[in-house]
Image (tube, rainbow, N blue to C red):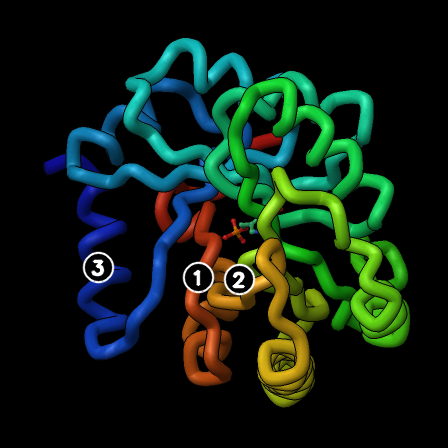
Amino acid sequence: MGKIGESISEIKKELKGYHYNLVAISKTKPFEAILEAYDAGHRHFGENKVQELVSKYEELPKDIKWHMIGHLQRNKVKYIAPFVHLIHSVDSVQLLQAINKEAVKNDRIINCLLQVHIAEESTKFGFDETKLLEVLNRNELNNLMNIKVVGLMGMATFTEDTRQIRKEFDSLKKLFDTLKAQFSFENFDLQELSMGMSGDYKIALECGSTMIRVGSSIFGERNYG
Ligand SMILES: *Cc1c(COP(=O)(O)O)cnc(C)c1O
């Protein structure tokens, strides 16, 4: 087994006892790196740019489950709608409407996570808690029958301060539990809590994450050139 396969095995060994889905974040990495993970048995991969996601989908084996994890513009939804497995980064009702429209055209249901802003940095995208409650209370997802909101996604502040990270993940888990108990529609059924990256996946799992998005710990550091 190559180095990438070994990294995945090591993470799985470290996380023995937890129930989670591991999404390998392959952004900026070449086809060969993904194929190495694929040959080691991995099937869930995530990308943050539409164009890169589409070209990797086209070139690589068709049983790969592709996750969109980056900010998504409404006019680009059409490129990924035919095949995307899960969109983690939905941050507006307008985007949900656009996804629904393309899902109808493709005669499929597209699974989505709502991205919630939990970090201190103001640069990170996502709903804030108040806005999200407003959307749900007003039943704004009504009629969007070709999308299904299956969970929430969040990113912690980029910091060494593990107490800060834990606090943010705890707050997202609390929101997840509250919404799950309070809202259940045909197209809104919270199952997945996507939180945790290379630097903080262990904390995220301790805080109740069900899905971790790990890039550099699997593929090595990214080089943006
Ligand atoms: C890049 C990225 C990741 C993975 O980051 P690593 O630190 O390399 O594990 C996870 N989630 C999102 C949204 C990302 O953009």
Count residues near mark 2 (Cα–Cα under 10 Å), then give few for <14, some for 14-19, many for 20+.
Answer: many
Instruction: Give the spatial CA distance, label 1 vs label 3.
Output: 17 Å
Nearer to the camera, 95 or 35: 95
- The amino acid sitting under disc 1 is Met
**Nearer-N-terminus badge (2/1):** 2
Amino acid marked by disc 3: Glu
Instruction: Name the residue type under label 2.
Output: Ser
Q: What element carries label 1?
A: strand
State the residue in front, 217 or 202. Answer: 202
State the separation of the CA atoms marked 2 and 3. Answer: 20 Å
Badge 2 marks a residue whose secondary structure is strand
| 65 sits to left or right of 153 | left
For label 3, the residue is 10
Q: Name the spot of residue 3 as percent of width and height, x first.
A: 22, 40
Q: Which residue is drawn at 78% across and 65% down?
A: 117
Q: How crowded is mark 1: few (under 14 residues within 10 Å), some or many (20 or more)?
A: many
- 15 to the left or right of 48: left
